Amino acid sequence: MRRILRTLLMGGLMFLMACRPLPAERESNPPGTPHSLDFGYGTRIETDEPGADSSLRWAAQNKFDWVALDFDWNATQPAPGTWNEDSSFANAIRQAHSLGLATLVSVKNPPAWAVNATGPNAVETARLILTLGRKYSSPTAVELFPAANTRSGWNAAPSPAAYAQFFEAIQESLQTENLEIYLIAGGLSNTLTSPEDMRDVDFLEQLYAVGLRPTILGIRLENLQGNPLDVPSQNSLRHYEEIRAIMVANGHQEGLLWITGFNLPAGTQPETWLRQAAPMMKSQLYLGTVFYSPENLEAEWIDPH
C-alpha cells in the first residue's frame, strides 16, 4: 500500500518541484545549511524496510534535498575492530550518495564498549565518524545521539555539561582531520519517558549556560496534538517557536534550527494538516531543514517547492 500511495503522490510532486535542479547538480552547500539561502526538504528513510531502495529512488526523483538515515552503532560495530559491511545502512548510504542526495546520519545506540559513566565516549565517537567518512564518502551531516535530553537517547542520565563537552570534542576532531561534516546538536525530544529525562527547553538553556553554541540545533517532535496553527506548546508543531525563543534570548540568532523528525497527530487528516504545516515551516527563516517521516509522505500534500 505504501508503494502505491507514493506512486500516486509522485506525479503531483514532480510537477510542483519541476523547476528545481536535480540533486546531483546542486552546489556543495545543500539547502538548509549555513551557507545556503534555500530551505531544505528531507525525508527519513527506514533502512531496515524492504522498500528502502525504492524509497531512496523516489526521494531523488522527486528532488528532495536530503535523506536521513539512522545508524545503529551497536548493530554495525558490536565490538572494536568489527564492522558490518553489508548492513542495510551501508547499502542505503551508498545508494543515497550515488543518487546525489545529501545525507543526515543519526548516530544512536552506541555499543557498551563506547559508553562511559557520563554517556557516549567522545574519542570512540570521533573515530566512528571518521570511519563513516572514509567508508561512505562522508555523510553531509551527522546528528549526534538524537534525544540527548533523555536517558534512552544519551545512554546515561542526560547532562547538558557532558553533552557540550562531548560535542566540542567531536567538533575539534573533525576540524583536525579537515573533515567537512555538519554536526547537528541535540536532536532534542519534546517527549519524556523517564524520571531522569530533561525537558528540551531546560536542556537547551543549560547548554547555553555551559557555553555551547552549535551552528545547527536539531529537535524531534513526537506525540503532536492539534492543528499546525495551534499556539506553541510542548506537544504542538509550533513548539519550535519556543525553542527559537530560547536561542534568541541567549543571543544565538545566527544559529539554525532543524526539525530532524516529526510525526502527525493521531487521527488527523494528513492532507489537510500538511497543507497548513509545510508552508508555515518554510516561512520561518531560522528553520534550515525539515525531515518528513515516511508516513507523512503517504498523504497527497502540496509541497511548496
Image (tube, helix red, strand yellow):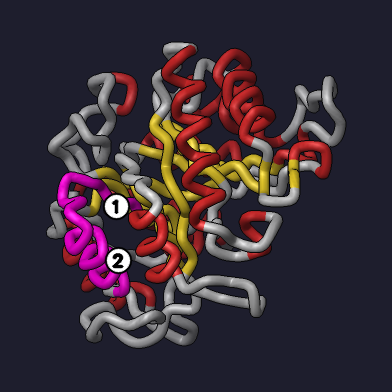
Circle nearer the viewer, 2 or 1:
2
Q: Is residue 30 visible?
A: yes
User: Viewer-proximal residue, 60 or 94?
Assistant: 94
Residue at the disc numbered 2: 243
User: Viewer-proximal residue, 45 or 6?
Assistant: 45
Q: Residues within 10 Å of mark 1 (few under 14, many from 20)?
A: many
Where does the magenta region start and end?
239-258
- Tag 1: amino acid: Leu
Discs 2, 1 touching: Cβ within 8 Å: yes
Give coordinates of residue 24: x percent, y percent.
33, 21
Residue at the disc numbered 1: 257
Q: Which mark is residue 288?
A: none
Q: Is residue 138 left or right of residue 275?
A: right
Q: Earlier in the sequence, mark 2 or mark 1?
A: 2
Name the image quarter holding residue 243.
bottom left
Q: Is residue 91 visible?
A: no
